[in-house]
Image (cartoon, rainbow, N blue to C red):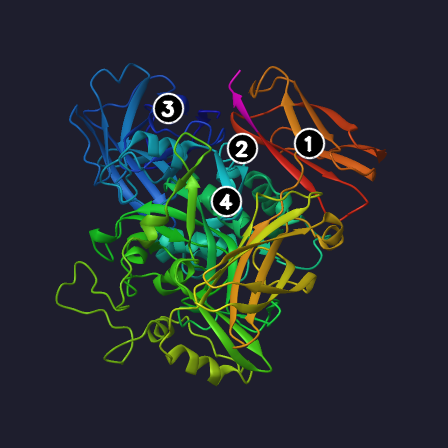
Amino acid sequence: MDCMQQTKQKFCGTGYDHCQLKLVNFEAHENHLSHETQGLSEKRLVVRRGKPFKFTLMFHSQLWSSYTESLVLDVRLGNMAQRIPVHFSDEQFDPHCWSAKIYPGNINAESVTIHICTPVSSSVAVYTLLVHIETKHFRRSYAVGSFVLLCNPWLKDDPVYIPQDVQIQEYIKSDYGMIYMGTNLNVCQRPWSFGQYEPGVLEACLKLLQLSPQHLQDKHKDYVLRADPVYLSRVICAMVNCEDDMGILRGRWQGSYKDGVKPSEWSGSADILHRWVSSNFSPVCYGQCWVFASVLCTVMRVLGVPSRVVTVFNAAHDGNANVKIEEYYSTTGEKLNLSKDSIWNFHVWVECWMRRPDLGEEFDGWQVVDPTPQEKSDGIFRCGPCPVVAVQQRCLGAHYDTPFVCASVDADVIRLIVRNGQVVSKKVNTELVGELIYTKSIGSDSPENLTQTYKTMKSDDPAVMLPGHPYEMVMMCSSAHPTPRSLARSAGLDRNRSNRMDCRMAEESLENDAESPPSLEVSLKIDGMPSVGESIPMCVTVTNQSSNPRVLMENLNAQIKEYNRNPQESFWKMQKEVHIKPHEVLKLQHTIPPSEYESVLAGDDIMNFAVVIKDVTTEERFLDTQEVNISSPQINIEIEGGDSIEMRREHTAQVSFTNKFTKTLNGAVLTVEGSGLLHGKQEASLSLLKPGEKIEKQVSIMASSPGTKVLMATFSHSNSPNVVSRSFHKVSVTSS
């Protein structure tokens, strides 16, 4: 930052020919170190609220006379102005009010250093600073520049204060994260570069606030409310998607991505923010949940709100808001697309740390903020901030969007087998949804399990008294005994339920029947974690709990699916008659060769396996299912000299892929890219890649800013053009 700035002056009165202000030194280096904002901007002074910062005034020939003239600061935000007289003092600052002082020893013949403290309740924004030199008869004014004011998680009085230094390091200062994906049985991880120290990222985040509908409709009101992190998070959450505003990202979950970037190809937020700015704030194409969440995490960390990316495995999207997820299967085990409800194999959102004075201190701490446009909150596509403790304790009346988040992590799954429009079997699973909830551990790439913070206390009564309101039951509907569905409906989350099929009445009667213990137990398990090109082994275990021998019909089914959608048509089926003795346990082994599934793979796919066992005599049916992601072959990435590189110095990266398949791959292409390390993409190609053969690409990388960057390599071939292997590699950049 050029911290020496020429001043623009405007003065009132006549006959004044004494001191004239020449330069202002914003002491950027010292202020940025003191305020923990180093690296956020080279052009602006960036400070945190509630903590003093300093600047030095330098005059042409002589200092102002402190006996006859006064120094007054004028801080402006929109149409608001704050007049701050400058005093000589060595007392401590009060972080709750505007004040400015000159310490003894901070003044000489031609310059003076002024310390200014902003209130901890100040709004996050860019402020303009003026200096007035006044007497009783005239005033000389200087527009000396501007400064960016952020939240201050280091300060106890700030509502985003987080107590531990390691938490601040991880959730504010770290520009690197780990996203967990796949299924709860085969968790995959990919690094993400939040990129808050990349040039232009701070400016993009500030522009995001200025382009919000709230600011465009009422600038004054928006500036006032920006002091509250609850308000900030709701505004930014909506602005990360573009559904209601000039937001950053457009989502797409199916179809072609040729007119943009496929969501799985992003590896960092900076590239997305840069594209948004350079396109004159047109939405960047395309995002999915982990992209939306990671960009939101970047913006919140930049603004000073502690944030982390969280993955919920088996996240429910409760389409009809009854806190139950209905899934339909055929008698042969094929999953049917008959429900508005769905379970995403994983869903990614953000937790932001803040106090909740609107709810009471019991709800302070981590808050769910979800920018993926799924449902509207107060008429806008956004979700949260919802207190995690409210989800855990099922306080459905707590703002914001708690019923939706509760259903996402703790709905019941009802699996129904249908035949000729009638429900012939029902199985309820109360543990599947939200079975695993992960975030990156502090100081480590390994996951931290957050499941118990969401699900420890599960109440049968959905209307829970809000802590802090001991004499008032929180009722969100007129019913004396509200149901989860009525609570969700009154919170604006209910949808019109479609007439799905003739089996509805049968389904309701089944739910009302008292369930007797099953006479047969059936479980399906995939052995190991399958990889593309390998056979998929599975085991069906059948336990006969009766004293009679039984003749069974085993139906196995396999379908390809994307993580957030119902499966496609079956690609593999099997039917077999099985005989089982009284109290016998049978283990039925099956294998799906790669030739059966490779032609239907479409990228980062998940497979849905289901088994339906039918008792031929009684016609009872028993269902079990499992979903597993198929791992791609790994690409090797090595940085010459190690994974820590110096800024603005050229380094070499070696990228290679070895064909471990038993067949020759045609049209092999290896691509390398990395925001902040490489300009554009670099490729190597081979017309034929034989078994055991290697394709390599050597690239020169250079970083222009410190922090953590991510190199991404992709491998594709024309044998299965839709199957792409991706690998990510973390690179730490140090200042030279």
In the image, taking residue 510 as reference, residue 266 lies left or right, namely right
Find residue 467 and report its image quarter.
bottom left
**Circle 1: residue type:** His
In terms of depth relative to the viewer, which is nearer, 286 or 418? Answer: 418
- Precedes in sequence: disc 2 or disc 4: 2
Disc number placed over residue 33 in the picture, else none: 3
The three-letter code of the residue at mark 2 reads Glu
Looking at the rendered image, the disc whose residue lies closer to the viewer, 4 or 1, is: 4
**Amino acid at dot 4:** Ser
Q: Amino acid at mark 3?
A: Leu
Q: Is residue 628 magenta?
A: no
Distance Cα–Cα, label 4 vs label 1? 22 Å
Q: Which mark is residue 679?
A: 1
Q: Is residue 76 left or right of residue 421?
A: left
From this viewpoint, which residue is outermost toward the left? 471
Please, what secondary structure does the residue beneath circle 4 have?
Answer: helix
Residue at 32% of width from left, 57% of height from top?
391
- Report the span colored magenta: 730-736
Residue 44 coordinates in the image, percent (x, y) = 45, 32
Q: Secondary structure at mark 2?
A: loop
Residue 368 percent across, percent down from the top left: 38, 52
- Residue bearing the label numbered 2: 198
- Camera-side mark, 2 or 4: 4
Element under disc 1: loop
Mark 2 vs 1, N-terminal side: 2
The secondary structure type at the circle numbered 3 is: helix
Who comes first in sequence, dot 1 or dot 3? 3
Q: Which mark is residue 294?
A: 4
